[in-house]
Image (spheres, grey):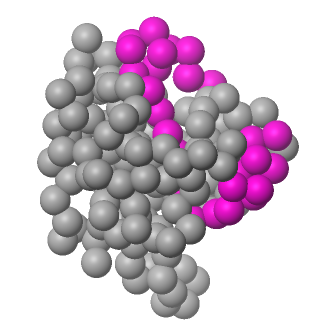
Amino acid sequence: MAGEYRVDTIPDVTVTGTDGAPLRLRDLPRPLIVYFYPKDDTPGCTHEALDFSALASRFAAAGASIIGISRDTVAKHNKFIARHGLGIPLGSDLDGSVTEAFGVWGERQMYGRTYMGIERATFLYGPDGRLVRAWRKVKVPGHAEEVLEAARALG
């Protein structure tokens, strides 16, 4: 269940990149922003990915890298990127090990229905791989800008 895991350092987990190759999160450049979202091509997830993409050059200027993670397939991620012209990398967590390691997989409710799903959450790790800030139960409007400001503050 969400919140029961310790993510004070980057967990030693691997997602599949859109090229099909494994991406070990600990090996990605830092500062590192890892954001989790429920599903490709849904309104909130699309808005969030577009917001992070629009700010990608500013994150790069701050020295920060970004990866968005969901349980969608690599093929679905590639369609999502192409359809919306996304400028950020996405990782596929088909087996759920990464969402479990970050504690973002659990019971969710929407429109009175209970189901298992991903909590929209973002984690910012500093150059030393230690957690600087976590945003849980993210509301999309203004979120990417808030994360950018936190990343800039590391510089």
Instruction: Report the residue at 26% width, 35% height from top.
Output: 125
Q: Is residue 58 left or right of residue 26?
A: right
Q: Position of residue 116 (x, y in %)?
A: 48, 83
Q: Is residue 38 visible?
A: no
| Residue range (magenta) | 54-82
Q: Position of residue 22 (x, y in %)?
A: 53, 48
Q: Is residue 84 left or right of residue 90?
A: right
Q: Is residue 5 left or right of residue 144?
A: left
Instruction: Report the residue at 68% width, 62% height from top.
Output: 73
> In front here: 4 or 11?
11
**Residue 37 highlighted magenta (yes or no):** no
Instruction: Report the residue at 46% width, 20% height from top.
Output: 59
Q: Is residue 84 left or right of residue 37?
A: right
Q: Residue furthest front?
A: 21
Above or below, 54 against 46 in this view is: above
Above or below, 122 against 85 in this view is: below
In which image quadrant can residue 30 be found? top left
Q: Position of residue 31 (x, y in %)?
A: 31, 26
